[in-house]
Amino acid sequence: MTRQNINRFALILVGVVAFGLPLVLRSPTYLHILILLYLYAYLTSSWNLVGGFAGVLPLGHSAFIGIGAYASTILSLQYGISPWLGMIVGGILASITGVLIGLPTFKMRGAYFALATIAFGEGIRVMVENVDNLGPLKINGPRGLQIPPTNIGFVNYMFNGKEPYYYIILVMLLGILAITYFISRSKLGYYLNAGGEEPEAAMALGVNVARAKLIAMAISSFFTALAGTFYAQFTLYIHPKSVISLDFSFEIAFIALIGGRGSIAGPVLGALLLRPVSDFSRIYFGATLPGLHLIIFGIVLILVMIYQPRGLQEPLTRVYNRLLDKIFGGTGKKEITHEYS
Amino acid sequence: MNILEIKNLVKDFGGLRAVDTLSLSIEEGEILGLIGPNGAGKSTAFNCIAGVYPPTGGKIYFAGEKINRSKPWNLCKKGLARTFQIVKPFSSKSVLYNVMVGSFVTTDKTSVAKEKALNVLRLLQFEDKKDERAGNLTIAERKRLEIARALATEPKLLLFDEVMAGLRPAEVDEMVQIIQNLRHQGITIFVIEHIMRAIMALSDRIVVIHFGKKIAEGSPQEVASDENVIKAYLGDEYVVS
Amino acid sequence: MIYILEDAINGVLMGSIYGLTALGLTLIFGVLKVINFAHGSLLMVGMYAAYWAIILTGVHPYVALVIVAPVMYLFGYYLQDIVIKPIFKAEKDVREPITVIIVTTGVWYILDNLTLLIFGPTYRNIQDNPLKGKMLEIGKMFISVPKLWGFVTAVITAAAVYWFLQKTRMGRAIRATSLDREAASLMGINQFKVYNVAFGIGTATAGIAAVTLVPFYNIFPSVGVLFDIKGFIIVVLGGLGSIGGAILGGIIIGLIESIAPQFMTATWTEAIVYGLFLVVLFVKPSGLFGVKYDW
C-alpha cells in the first residue's frame, strides 16, 4: 500500500462518512452546525486561492459574498429568476469586481494591499447600506432583504429541513477542494506559487505575476459569491452588516491562516478546529461571556503565527504521517513530491 | 547576426549616472564577458537589458527587435533569460518544482513541463537532487539551480550575473565546463564575472567597463594587456583565482 | 455662510484630534514598517484607562494624562516586546513582515473582546466633567471647548514627538532604524530596543488622544474600530511615517466630515472618505508628505 493509495482511501472514507452523516445524525441543530462548518471551510478554501496561492492578504472578501447574495436575491425576488441562475450572475459580477479591485491593488506591497482590500470591502458595505433603490432594483439599505420561504423546490433553491442544504454545501465544498487541487498542479498554480515566493525571479522566468494573481482573484471571487447565494437561501435574510462585514472577512482570513494558507488541507483544517470553538462558546457562553470565541481566535492566531507561521496543517500532517507509519509501516519520512509542498 | 545590440545605453539614478553611453553587440553563438571593478555598472546594464530598469537613454535590440521597455516575462518568452547575482530560489519548493516553473514558458501541460525539467536537470548533472527542498541546498547547488531554471525557459541568450561568486576553485571549474557545454546547445551567453580565471577561460570576447563607461574591448589576451584596464584595476580588490 | 465657517473650524479641531490618534500609527509604521491593526484597540484601552482614572480620582480629565500616558507607554512597550518581537526575529529578512500585521489583528480581537467581556457593552461617558458641552462664543459662532483643548494638545504632542525624533539620541536612533534597520544595527543601535520604544511612544500618544476624546466622546468596547480605519486613512493621506502629515491628514478628514454633511447624508460622507483613501492609495501611495518608498 503506497502512501498515495492510503491517502486516497482515507479521503474516500471521509467522503462516504460525510455523505452518510445526515442519515445518522437527525438533530437539526447539529446539522446546522455542520452546514456552517462546511460553509466556512468552503469560503476559506476559496479565499485561499488568493490569500494562500497568490501570497497576499485580502481582507475584504466578504464583499463578494455580499455581491453573490444580493444578486441572486434581487433577481429572484423582483424578477422571479431561479436563484441558481442568479447565483451564476452573482458569481460573474463578483469576478469582474474582483478583477477591478485587483488591477490597482496587486501592484501594492503587502500592508497596503491589505488596507486597500479593507477599504474596498467597507466602501462597498457603506454604499449598499446607503442605497434603497438602484434604479429599478430594490436594495433596501441597512434593512436588508428578506426571502419568504414559499415556493419550495429545487428550482427555487428552497427546501424544508436542513438535509438538502447540507448536501448542497457539501458538494460545493468538495468542488472547491477539487478545483484547488487541480489548480495547484497546473501551470497557474506553479506560477502563483513562484510569484508569491520570489516575484522577481518568477518574472525573469516568464511569469506574468500580476496576471496570474488577477486570474486567481477572478476565480476566487466567483466561487466566494456562490456561497453568498447559498447563505441567502439558507438564512432567508441578508443585510449589509451580515454579508459584507469586516468581521466576516477577518474570520475567513484567520481560519485560513491558522489552518495554513497555501495548502489545500489547511483552510479546511482551520475551519474544523475553529468553528466548533466558535459555535460551542457561543452556545454555552454566549450570554455570560460574549465574544469569548473571538478572544480564543485571537490568542490562537497569535500563537500559531509565532510558532507555526505556515499553519497548523504542517505539524498535523506530520502527526498523520507518523500515525500511518505506525499502523502500516513505512519509511517514516514523507516523500516530498514536486507537487505543491 | 547580432543577437544583442546595445547603442549608447544610459541609466541614471537621480543624479548618479550608473551606465554612461555603453555600446556593444553580441554575435549569435559567442560568449561575451563583461568585467569591471565593483560598482562599475555591470549589473545595472544587465538589469536594463532584462527589463528590470527602464533605460534613461539609448536603444537595446534583441534579435533585431527593440526591447527598451519590455517586461521581464515577455523578454523571457522571446528567449532572453537571466540569473540573479543574489540567487532567488523558490526555497519552500523542490528543485524539480523550481525548474518546472521555467519549463512552463514553452508548454501549458504539467506533465510536459516535468519531462523538460528533468531533461535540464540531467544535462546539468543535477538530477539526483530533484526532490531536494531548494532552501536546503548549498550555495554551489543553488547557483546550479539558478542556471537550470533559466535554461528550462529554452533561451537564445542567457545573461549570467556573477554566477561563480562564492564558489570554490573546483566548483568554478565545474561551472565553466557547464557553461561551455551550453554554448554547444546553441545558446549565446553574456556573462558578468569577477573571477578572472573563469572569465578568461570562457569568453570569446570581453568588454571592460569602469564608472559606467566602456574602457576596453577585445579578446581576453588583448584586454588583459590593455593599459586602461590595468590602470582601472590597480589597487582594487579583484579576485584572481 | 457663518455656519460653514463654524463647521469648518470645529472640523479642523476635531480633525487635529483624529490626527493625534493617527500619530502613533504613523510612527509605528515609519519605524517598524508595520501597520498596527491594533492601534484602534489601544486607543480604546486608553479611553477606558482615562475613564477609570478620572472617575476614581475625580480629577480634571487632562490631569489624568499624568497617569494614562506613562501607563500606555509601558503597555505598548511590553506588548511589542512580548508579542511582536518574536515574530520579527523569525522574519528578520523579510522587508515588510505580513505575519506581524496578522498578529496585530489578533491583538485587536483580543483587546476588543476582552474589554467587552470585562466591562460589558454599555456606552459610558463622563457626565459631569468640566469640559463637557462647553462652547466658546466667537461672534456668532460656537466653538467646541473640549475640541479646542484637543487641538492644542494635538499640536503640542506632535511638536514634542517631532522634537524628540530630531534632537534626542534615542530619537535619532529611531529615525536611523526606520531608514535602514540593518545599517542602524551595524552602527550599534539595538533595533529591538528601538522598536519597543517606538511602539511605546506610539501607544502613549494614543493614550493622550484618548484623554482628549474622553470629555466628549462615548466609550465602548468597539470604539476603537472607527478610529482604526480612520487612522489608516489619515496615515495614508498624510504619508506613512510623517508626523506633520498625520495631523494634516486628520484635519482634512475632520473638514470633510464637518462640511460634507451639509450637502449629503452622513453615510455618503463615509463613502467619500473611503473613496478618497483609495484614490490616494492608487495615485500617490506615499501620501502628501510621506517618504517615498520603492513600492
Image (cartoon, rainbow, N blue to C red):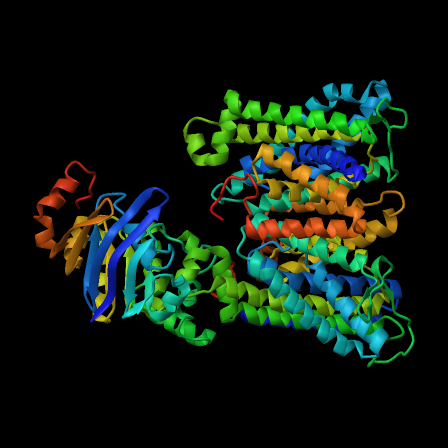
Residue positioned 83% across, 22% down in the render: C54
Instruction: Indicate the quadrant where residue C224 lies.
Output: top right
Residue positioned 33% across, 47% down in the render: B12
Q: Is residue A313 visible?
A: yes
Residue positioned 42% across, 52% down in the render: B136
Residue positioned 70% across, 44% down in the render: C229
Q: Position of residue C288 (x, y in %)?
A: 57, 41
Q: Is residue B214 above or below residue C130?
A: below
Instruction: Indicate the quadrant where residue B190 lies.
Output: bottom left
Which quadrant is the N terminus of chain A positioned in?
Answer: bottom right
Instruction: Indicate the quadrant where residue B95 lies.
Output: bottom left
Comparing B89 with B68, the one in front is B68
Q: How many marks?
A: 0
Q: Where is residue B217 in the image (x, y as percent from the top left)?
A: 14, 54
Please indicate whether residue C67 sits to the left or right of residue A133 in the image: left
Q: Is residue A299 visible?
A: no
Q: Where is residue A251 in the image (x, y as percent from the top left)?
A: 72, 53
Please indicate whether residue C258 sits to the left or right of residue A323 in the image: right
Please indicate whether residue B84 sits to the left or right of residue A60 in the image: left
Q: Position of residue B139 (x, y in %)?
A: 34, 50
Please indicate whether residue C219 sits to the left or right of residue A218 in the image: right
Comparing B31 with B90, the one in front is B31
